[in-house]
Image (cartoon, rainbow, N blue to C red):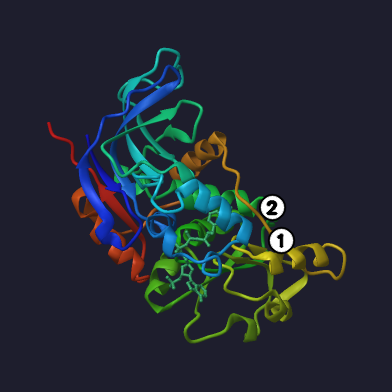
Amino acid sequence: MKAVVVTQYGSPDVLQVRDVPKPAPKDNEVQIKIHATSVGYGDIICRNFSHISPREFNMPFLFWIMARLAFGFRTPKKQILGAEFAGEVESIGKVVTRFKIGDPVFGFRGAGFGANAEYLCMPEDGLVALKPANMTYEAAATVPYGALTALNLLRKVNIQPGQTVLINGASGGIGSAAVQLVKHFGAQVTGVCSTPGMAYVKALGADKVIDYTHEDFTKQADTYDLIFDILGKGSFAQAKRVLKSNGRYLFASFKMKQLFQMLWTSRIGSKRVICALSMEKPEDLILIKGLVEAGKITAIIDRCYPLEQTAEAHRYVEKGRKTGSVVITIAHPL
Ligand SMILES: NC(=O)c1ccc[n+]([C@@H]2O[C@H](COP(=O)([O-])OP(=O)(O)OC[C@H]3O[C@@H](n4cnc5c(N)ncnc54)[C@H](OP(=O)(O)O)[C@@H]3O)[C@@H](O)[C@H]2O)c1
């Protein structure tokens, strides 16, 4: 089968289309013929990991070491990138009961990657579910990462209808799903991103959008019950004045400083810092499928590239100017 293979860390030029063995399903696995996959934050980082210093990595040093071990110190252990996928079940292992041949499915590989390929295998009890009936394969391939992560992190803060929520990093993979989930929970959403993403965040349902290149949300009059900071670009110390009493500052990306703030604010004061890790479960993906079918989560695609142009797709995402998701489509020979 064809796959995009990366054998050394570096620029998008390291991504090469090659023929590799087609994976065969184990007894408990489904083999999926992939129609679409995506390019997101994780793909860019993993392709270039030897050039990401602990300082540039948005998590504590220990996580950087763990990621470096998992991804490979000198050369990439994950030779096929792609964390999200949508496709059809091509064959099933002997004991599979949840899926049948021909089922349209979507799913998430997480740090396992492997979806920039014509086929992959997933355990039937892994992060794979029937594709939302109202979505194309292209759209469905952009949903799992952001929606699973945002859902898991937002569960830590139990949003109530009528609350006010600011999402710092609203135009990215996690932020775009968070905007929609927070609206679904009945809260008012303010999204923060740079100029090109503003219309996109508005289209996702944000009540207000702030351009961080022109305005500092910590200096405005509006106040929030929750600030959800995706890249950890904001500062709790500065944002405190726009957090309501009992307000929470939720970090998806954090360093030791924010972990100490979490400890400190759990004991002192009414405003709290929360640093959280997402632990996705297969039932979450089924819940997300339902939210998509109910029209609560949608996908806005910026660009589609064929598998052969995955390097181009990486170049585009790396520019940081995407306004929606970037999809890789896979055409299978008849
Ligand atoms: N806690 C967890 O379990 C968990 C799980 C997965 C990922 N993560 C973390 O999530 C992060 C990746 O999130 P993602 O995939 O959503 O990234 P992404 O798709 O690259 O999106 C990043 C977002 O941040 C915005 N942004 C960039 N610079 C900013 C600034 N100075 N101020 C405010 N916003 C800014 C971007 O807006 P513009 O494009 O308009 O600049 C964009 O909306 C990583 O740091 C990763 O470590 C955490």
* Secondary structure found at label 1: strand
Q: Amino acid at mark 2?
A: Lys
Q: Is residue 249 visible from the viewing direction of this image?
A: no
Residue labelled with disc 1: 274
Left or right of 104 on screen, residue 275 = right
Q: Position of residue 172 (x, y in %)?
A: 45, 63
Q: Residue furthest top?
A: 94
At label 1, the amino acid type is Ile
Task: Tell me if residue 61 comes above or below residue 242 in the rendering.
Answer: above
- Report which residue position mark 2 lands on: 156
Q: Is residue 198 left or right of residue 191?
A: left
Q: Position of residue 248 (x, y in %)?
A: 72, 65
**Residue at the far front in the pictured view:** 74
> Residue at image x 46%, y 21%?
98
Image quarter in which the N terminus is found:
top left
**Could one spot residue 275 in this view of the protein?**
yes
